[in-house]
Image: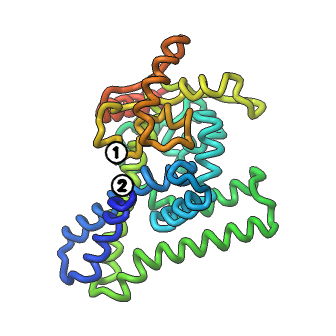
Amino acid sequence: MKALIMFSLLWIPMIVLHVVPNIPWYGLIALGLLIGSGQSGIGLSVMHDALHAAFFKSKKWNDRLGTLSMIFVGGYASNWKMQHNQLHHSYTNVHGVDLDINPPSTLLRFSPYDPLKKVHKYQYLYAWFLYSLMSLFWCIKKDFKDLYLFRELGFYDGKGSQFKKEVITLIFHRVIYFGFWIGLPVLFTSYTIWQILLVFLFKHLFTGFALAVVFQPAHVSDGSSFEIVDDGEVKEDWAIHQLKTTVNFAMTNKIFTWYAGGLNFQIEHHLFPSVSHVHYPKLAEIVKRTADEFGIPYLSHPSFRSALIKHGISLYQLGRA
């Protein structure tokens, strides 16, 4: 049901754009924001579960749903599995390995092991704007850049057939994406290219911001630790490492949990990534009780607002030391 609702938020505004003429500029912005709410909802609670093999019991159907979701939100499933499933989940908050704390812009500093620049002093103010550009950068440049990075890291076979296949597939997916969201409206509606781009822009502004304010406070926050490794191995027990680098928030907010796909229960997600997010609240009771029993920190903030405040404080501190 949730997947149907999220895809409806994505598709219905697009249908409105095709059948309703003369929508004013502020109406087009509203349509873009509505599409963005569906796009980010799919990313958080449909695509994310599917690519973790947690949506269906069947691997084939998880891969199909994950790939389809990625095509229409402007991502690339193969890259996501490498960056998120392999690197982020195995080396959470590890400098130089976890790409989630390695922002594309040097204007942001998410780790105390990154070089400190004068401009970082103000990142707690401007980071929120840069977050809104995240998904736009993702669909235009990031996936192509990451594809070559993963080749350098040895995930692909250099210039061989596997890498060429990935490049061709990524280009094909982007043709579908830009063709659907920009090409079709330009060809089959009365709106100009600039009006369509206005919808497209605000779709991404909402998506980028929504994804960032769910994912970033879960790891760059008050109390979360950051690591650096010399030999590619995390010295601490994997489960303990996840607890020390990950933060939950808004655990009693059922509406937020529903929309965010349980990613406010980030600890449980990291410990049990292939378990559907609908089970996280119950798992959290067991995990917290066990952590308390063994004296391991269980980091959490009571609300989404408090998580954002703590994230802002972390950005402030990382901008100074």
Relative side of 123 to 34, left or right: right
Q: Assign a secondary structure to mark 1.
A: helix
Q: Which residue is mark 1?
A: 258
Relative side of 274 to 134, left or right: right
Q: Say which amino acid is labelled 1.
A: Trp
Decide: few, some or many residues near mark 1? Use Cα within 10 Å; few <14, some 14-19, many ≥20. Answer: some
Instruction: Work out whether 315 lies above or below 12.
Output: above
Residue 216, position as x, y percentages in the image: 45, 39
Q: Quadrant of residue 234?
A: top right
Instruction: Compare residues 182 and 266 and report the one nearer the observer.
Output: 266
Instruction: Compare residues 272 and 320 and report the one nearer the observer.
Output: 272
Q: Say which amino acid is labelled 2.
A: Lys
Instruction: Work out whether 261 lies above or below 1.
Output: above
Residue 148, position as x, y percentages in the image: 69, 59
Q: Is residue 117 visible?
A: no
The quadrant of the rendering that contains the N terminus is bottom left
Q: Which mark is residue 266?
A: none
Instruction: Residue at the far front: name it.
Output: 57
Instruction: Work out whether 1 lies above or below 223.
Output: below
Q: How is the image coloured?
A: rainbow
Identified at 60% across, 31% down, the residue is 113
Q: Which mark is residue 2?
A: 2
Q: Is residue 18 visible?
A: yes
Identified at 18% across, 82% down, the residue is 22
Instruction: Work out whether 124 lies above or below 46.
Output: above
Identified at 25% across, 83% down, the residue is 19
Residue 232, position as x, y percentages in the image: 75, 34
Contact between marks 2 and 1 (CB within 8 A): the answer is: yes
Q: Assign a secondary structure to mark 2.
A: helix
